[in-house]
Image (cartoon, coloured by chain):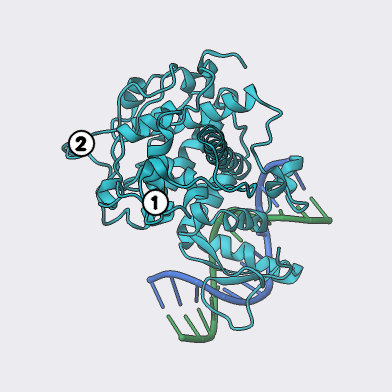
Chain colours: A cyan, B blue, C green
Amino acid sequence: MGSPAHDLPTGTLHLPYDFTVLGSSPMDSWTSMEDTKPPRGLPSMTERGLPERGLPERGLPERGLPERGLPERGLPGVYLSCLDMLLSEDAAWLLKRTEVTNPLVAYVRDHDYSHDHHPDADRKPPHCKEPDQCPVIDSQGLGVLSPQLEGQVEERCLEQVHCLVVGEVLKDIEMACKLLNITPDPMDWSSGNVQKWLLWTEHLYRLPQVGKAFQELAGKDLCLMSEEDFKQRSPQCGDVLHAHLDIWKSAAWMKERSPGDNLIGTEELCSEADSCCSGQPIHLWQFLRELLLKPNTYSRCIRWLNKEKGIFKIEDSSHVAKLWGIRKNRPAMNYDKLSRSIRQYYKKGIIKKPDVSQRLVYQFVHPV
DNA sequence: CAGCAGGAGGTGA
DNA sequence: TCACCTCCTGCTG
């Protein structure tokens, strides 16, 4: 687009991630929302790339907190689902190993809160004698590698991790776009799209409702707003929303810069049943399946009980209904109505009740 | 009380 | 016409 909002620098990945979620599932963060400290401001990503201000320092007094807070580890944690499998120790080690070559990682190091959750996060992983001498995987079977080769292999590994993270973020954004029926580039959003995005973000991260504060604003206006503007309109979570928008902006920017890059596993997102790829309105059963396909983000409200058999459980009925309502622009949507729609699928042979009927448990007649 | 089942009329694409 | 949405009654655990 070439818009100011997209004039990000090249060469480094500029996403305000909180890498400290590496050792814990984002949904764990969500789980802990009610009983843990509320969110603190996320770093704002500037046009220069790295945040203007760092993440709040540990031990700083909490500021005014919304009733329903973000996951403790911060909103971007949701975007790191692909790294859930990494042990926190390994993650810490990885950060140490990569900070030299990647400014973003160095930034993350500087703002590493992993000690909050993992007191041993700095400890090297058990399989490493010293962080600096961590064995490099010799996938070629060449035996001991020369330091130069080792460096190259290492760099490649880091690149792969990098790509994995970026790819996962883009996938999640793409998924959200499909679910909301909006474009990935905030610059293209109408005011209606902005409201949808706000509603979605509020519900996903349980932020206080601030949609009214951003009424009449199109995506373009939103992109031109500074963090201060955001905070002015929403003192409670303006900074979080601004940071979240930054992620979307950078994703759009990256996509625009390298449209050929196949960072996104579109085949996963656009299976033959996904009519949303062809511009058709999404069906409820498709919507449910989309949520089920993103367990790292939505398993708190809907999850597979038996994926092979297509049996799933709606864990948070009102939340799923709300998400569906947002998607369909039906603010009055509730589980009663949603379940009525699900029951319409009984006749059509799309969804049924499992043989052993349980509350909130349904089964796709034709599992994926 | 929340969830389930299903009838019936309405709505928008 | 279709795919819901909305409202409803009655039943169940």
Give whichever of A2, A23 is nearer the camera.
A23
Which amino acid, mark 1?
Cys
Q: Is residue A271 above or below residue C8?
A: above
Position in image of residue A351 (x %, y %): 68, 68
Sequence-wise first label, 1 or 2: 2
Marks 1/2: CA–CA distance: 40 Å
- Secondary structure under the numbered disc 1 in the rendered image: loop
Q: Which chain carries label 2?
A: A
Where in the figure is residue A215, as x and y percent of width and height? Answer: 45, 28
For label 1, the residue is A128
Q: Circle 2 sits on which residue?
A: A63
Residue sitting at x 55%, y 41%: A145
SS category of the residue bearing label 2: loop
Residue A115 locus on image (x, y percent): 26, 47
Q: Is residue A218 above or below residue A332?
A: above
Q: Which residue is drawn at 60% across and 13% down?
A: A2
Q: What residue type is labelled 2?
A: Arg
